[in-house]
Image (cartoon, rainbow, N blue to C red):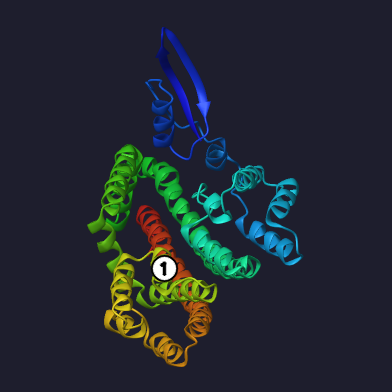
Amino acid sequence: MAKEEDKIQVEGTIVEGVMEAPEEAAVLQKLKTSGVIPIKVSMPKDKTKRSLRFGSRRPDLLTFTTELSALLDAGLPLDRSLNILAEISANSSMKAVIESVLKSIREGRSFSESLQGHPRVFSSLFVNMVKAGEAGGVLGVVLQKLGEFQESTKELKDHVFSAMIYPIILLVTSGLSVVLLLAFVLPRFSVIFSELGTALPVPTQILLAFSGVLQGYWWVGMLGIVGVWALARSYLRTESGRLTWDRLKLVLMGDVIRQLETARFCRTLGTLLRSGVSLLQALNNSRDVVTNTVMASAIDRVSRGAKEGRGIAAPLADAQVFPPLALSMILVGEETGQLDVMLLKVAAAYERSLKESIKRVISFLEPAIILVMAGVIGFIVVAMLMAIFSITDLPV
């Protein structure tokens, strides 16, 4: 819908109003054919999008998909199902989205077209799968597959998040402990040492000098950190910066990144193919879920190979970014005509492997953080003890 906030002047009359249309160009055309002169035409503010941005909770897409699939399987029509979901939705943002989609359907648009009006909620993957379900008359089945896909994706994200909670808490608390020691505890001792006027051991002098710099020029450090972060963020937003960062991630955590992206790509592609989406369209949508630009560019070459009739196994092998086991299983799927089945099996296998890899990384990361922070705190304690022993002339 586009709003005509305009000041249309005909015979000295200025008119302002609202006109229903899919886009602004259609409003302009209608106004011109009606004999009036449009001065300004603009879209109205979308309250749904605003509530999604500033709302306290994000729309529960998984719940929406699962409940809608259940209602359609029970034999209810789509508009009735959406009306029920709008009434029972506890999330105000999602309720507004469902009502907007329902209104669009009642105006004559298809379900997939109505979903496209809310790109913040429904991804292109979701919309294309719904479109395939509408075309094949199996919308309920497609929504069920979408729900399974979202559940597996959420489970993987939750596993990664829960695995990283403890190392992050450990790192933050240890860092704060060191800062408190250097900024508040050591300055009290430095006053005592300076009053005594005795020569301090070199480690103590280094420690007190660092503490003095931290206490007097902490704001310089903060500005430096903020500046470096801003520059890094600006660089990573560029194409070359993101490519460099993704290459570095492949070098540092190659196995974990490859397993993660392989699982995402194969599960998305397998789900799309099983839902009736064409191979080329499925490849384009599957590329969007791959966050590593190095691997995503390799999938672009796979799409070109598929257009040339080479399938996807050979182009994926040429790209040399996917694990050999995944390539072998995909090749078997192509040869047996069960590519979608094999892709989902590959995704399940690499999701299990990814969980094990994350466990190994975390099992190494936790003791590494503890050892590093213990070494730092140990150095502080030893430096202070050396100073105390030197003052009292006790043997160290």
Marks counted in the figure total 1
Q: Residue at x 30, y 57 (%)?
A: 203
Mark yes or no: residue 162 visible. Answer: no
Choose between 383 and 46: the one closer to the eye: 46
Q: Secondary structure at mark 1?
A: helix
Mark yes or no: residue 258 visible. Answer: yes
Q: What's the amino acid at mark 1? A: Gln
Q: Is residue 258 left or right of residue 367?
A: left
> Farthest residue in the top direction?
12
Q: Residue at x 54, y 69 (%)?
A: 156
Residue 96 in the image: x percent, y percent? 63, 42
Choose between 169 and 122: the one closer to the eye: 122
Q: Is residue 106 left or right of residue 17?
A: right
Q: Residues within 10 Å of mark 1 (few under 14, many from 20)?
A: some
Residue 18 in the image: x percent, y percent? 52, 26
Q: Is residue 102 above or below residue 267?
A: above
Q: Is residue 160 left or right of residue 311?
A: right
Residue 282 in the image: x percent, y percent? 43, 70
Q: Residue at x 53, y 80 (%)?
A: 348
Choose between 26 and 317: the one closer to the eye: 26
Residue 32 in the image: x percent, y percent? 39, 26
Instruction: From the image, tell me which residue sits under label 1.
Output: 281
Image quarter where the C terminus lies is bottom left
Picture quarter containing residue 192? top left
